[in-house]
Amino acid sequence: MLEMKKTIILLIVLASLFTACKDPFLNSEYLVRTGEDLSLSNAEYFSKYPEKYSKWVELLKYADMFNAMNDAATSSTVFAPDNDAMDKFLQWKGIKSIQELDKQYAKYVVQVHIIKGIISNNDFIADVNAGSIPIKTVFGSYLTTSYGYKITDVDDNLRDLSIHDSLSIYLNNQAKVASIGSGGAITANGIIYTVKDVIRPLSETIIDRLRVYKDEYSIFIKAAEITGYEKVASVYADTVSNLDGSISINQIRNTCFAVPDKVYNDAGIKSVEDLESYLQAGSDFASPANAFYKYMAYHFLPQSFNKETLSKFKVIGEVSLYDTKLQGNIITVNSDNGVLKINNLASVLRSNIEARNGVIHKIDNILPIYSPKPIRVAWDFCNAPDIESFVNAYGATNKVGDLFSTPLTNKETQIDLSLDHLQGNFGTLTSFQYVASTSKTPAQSYRKVGFFKCAYVSSAQNTVNTYGANMDNLMILNLGYTGYITLKTPTIIKGKYKVVLYYAGSPGLKTFYTNGSNTRFNLDDYQKNLYMWKGLPGTFVDVTKRTNSIANGIAADVLWDVVEFPESGTHTLKATILDINAKTNSTYRQMWDYMEFIPLEQ
């Protein structure tokens, strides 16, 4: 808790330095000056070289952030646009002066160029090679890094793999870093790298991001406005007051499937009124029960999925399901000869349009609400919006980026999701509830409930994790004897299914391979006692591990040969640990991967 309080205080101080409405450091002195660059603050360094930075200084002052650059106690890395970069930026905005910028937007522009702390030249080059800087900007976003840039803001069929200006370093595929020669300019309170382009802050939420494309999405935008869904789609963070008096901030991320005007027009829909008629929406558009509101909610997913993630299939012909923000309704995603298809109807015309609170995919179909037949569901226990937000907030605090989806490394990482908050409180978790009892296994070794990021097999196999786990992660459970956890499944389409549990075995658990470990599972009214690990390693999914008792691997056990769901919707899973070893054995823990629902022929 003390560590969390320190973090909150640090964030508050940082926010006061860089986001105050009035410059808090006006007329203050902090540094002893000699006139040498090393004795100058960042602000004074910019002022010393007006031929290069005068317009950046003008922007800093307009955003009330100039004197924050004087503070000796606050070191920062600044990617400072030169005057030519500022001129190009104003031209791109269609204005002639900095004073024509919205003042809040001007502040965002400044913030996205500043990172707290000093990124040395060697660290910066390492970050360039890694593809991103793992520390958030003051704006709250990560900067990607690359050698050269790609043309991406076009429809997918116009994109190519060409890398332009490949000998130069770029930030966010936008801003060219001036040749650093002997390195960035070191000052008394930071380091400065000059950039030849302004980094554009991703300040627009989803609907505002669509407005950037002028009249291309006018019907979809108007539909969001009249249904009130524009407000839903503008939320990027949720502040929650916890029972202990602390405050948690959960990041909100969505995926939007946006329909352009041309697609509507080709279907005979020329206006939002025509869309209302097509949907037979009545008049109370803002009601969640209204067909128009449902249509808009159906075009949003409650997590951010780029095209690459949507395109990951384990086997040829696999169909993936994703919950939409219209409760109880899903979309299907599959590959049709290499073309990504949504509901077997829509293709993606332009992918990965980034917004502050998610990602947008431009599609070529109206995408009406769809009720598919039963489809296989692979429910990854850690793949929930609140867990993803929590894990990524931990990653931001510990300077390892969006850990939920970052590439594998040679290290395993475990994050405490329990109320113990052993590593800090990074958000409010509602996707599961648990009750823990006495356990001999220390929570410092294995959390009561934890997110476990796997390590890669080797540097030569750095995209394959050592367990073979789905999504490269596992859920740790160290709940003690009679401890239990409850979770909600994703939406399952009505029908009959076979249910299979996938979980991890490892050398520390091989004492249970002979007799197994009793755990009772309840799925709604269905119940099954499963002796986990019994028969390993001979029942590992990976056949190459079936004779290796010291292998990390994934086991699969059938929980129910047949379950029937009379209606589409979510279901409650409860697991109770009934093995006394969960209380007495100092290495006992369960490591869950995912649950598979396999539709049965009807």
Image (cartoon, grey):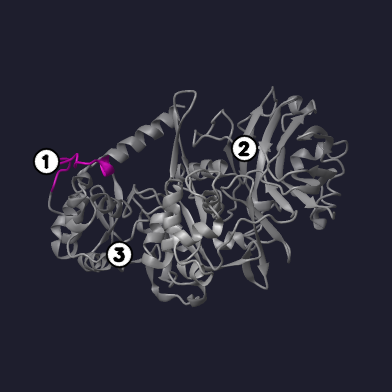
Residue at horizontal 69 percent and vertical 47 percent from the top: 379
First reached walking from the N terminus: tag 1 or tag 2: 1
Q: Secondary structure at mark 2?
A: strand
First reached walking from the N terminus: tag 3 or tag 2: 3
* Residue 134 visible somewhere in the drawing: no
Rendered location of residue 297, percent (x, y): 53, 50
Q: Secondary structure at mark 1?
A: loop
Mark 3, Cα crowd under 10 Å, few <14 / some 14-19 / many 20+, is few
- The image quadrant where one finds the C terminus is bottom right
First reached walking from the N terminus: tag 1 or tag 3: 1
Q: What amino acid type is highlighted by mark number 2? A: Gly
Q: CA distance from mark 1 to mark 2?
A: 49 Å
Q: Is residue 111 left or right of residue 511?
A: left
Mark 1, Cα crowd under 10 Å, few <14 / some 14-19 / many 20+, is few
Q: CA distance from mark 1 to mark 3?
A: 34 Å
Residue at horizontal 48 percent and vertical 75 percent from the top: 159
Q: What amino acid type is highlighted by mark number 3? A: Ser
What secondary structure is the magenta-colored segment mainly? Answer: loop
Rendered location of residue 381, percent (x, y): 66, 43
Rendered location of residue 17, percent (x, y): 26, 41
Q: Secondary structure at mark 3?
A: loop
Residue carrying label 1: 27
Residue carrying label 2: 450
Q: For residue 124: magenta?
A: no
Q: Is residue 345 left or right of residue 555?
A: left
Residue at horizontal 47 percent and vertical 66 percent from the top: 260
Is residue 289 or residue 560 the one in the foreground? 289
Q: Which residues are magenta?
A: 17-33
Q: Is residue 227 left or right of residue 97?
A: right
Residue carrying label 3: 182
- Looking at the picture, does residue 486 appear above or below residue 550? above
Is residue 25 or residue 206 the one in the foreground? 206
